[in-house]
Image (cartoon, grey):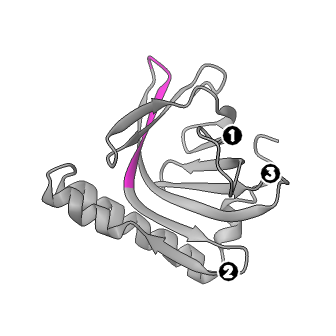
Amino acid sequence: MDKNNLLLYRRRYIPDELILLKDDIILYADENIIKTKWNVLKPRKDFSHGISWYYIKEGWKISSFLKEDGSLLYYYCDIIDVEYNKEENKCVVNDLLADVKIYPDGKVEVVDIDEIADSLDKGIITAGSAKKALRQLDSLLRIIYSGKFREYYDTSGIGE
């Protein structure tokens, strides 16, 4: 994976969209990890920028949502599936709907589980994708509850 020419896309199912993350700065990329920094696509009052770690094999994207002053609003963890095309150096990150927010005070909030059920009902995702999302969510929650979450966002200066 060549970070200098990597085409990074985000696919969401709700709403249905595929977006080239052309303004994200790719700090690091290999077969298991992509690290980016970015500014919000649309102006917001609660946060302005962030850093994202894509853990390809684990199926997680862990993002630090940062306020204008650089302080942490929360960590936002997406459950993902990644499709990589080596010939095009193109990476499509599919958002598998379930998400976890982790606040600076340690509060953990699991969100959007209902979107998995709704997407199954509407035929937007397959049962296989739903099962994968739930298994990856479970593995992420186990890491969070074990106290080892910090190892996944504070990683030895990769991309610094």
Q: Amino acid at mark 3?
A: Glu
Main secondary structure found in the magenta portion: strand
Q: Is residue 96 above or below residue 116?
A: above
- Badge 1 is on which residue? 39
Label drawn at residue 106: 2
Is 128 or 49 nearer to us in this picture? 49
On-image quarter of the N terminus = top right
Residue 154, located in which quarter of the rendered image? bottom right
Q: Amino acid at mark 2?
A: Gly
Tell me which numbered mark, 1 or 2, is placed earlier along the sequence.
1
| Residue at image coords 69%, 37% | 28
Tell me which numbered mark, 3 or 1, is placed earlier along the sequence.
1
Tell me which numbered mark, 3 or 2, is placed earlier along the sequence.
3
Label drawn at residue 68: 3
Choose mark 1 or mark 2, whichever is in front: 1
Q: Is residue 41 above or below residue 45?
A: above
Q: Regarding mark 3 in the picture, which secondary structure is present there?
A: loop
Q: Regarding mark 1 in the picture, which secondary structure is present there?
A: strand
**What's drawn in magenta, residue-wise?**
87-96
Q: Amino acid at mark 1?
A: Asn
Crowding around mark 3 (Cα neighbors within 10 Å: few <14, some 14 to 19, many 20+) is some
Q: How many marks?
A: 3
Give coordinates of residue 16: x percent, y percent. Answer: 31, 41
* Left or right: residue 40 compared with residue 154: left
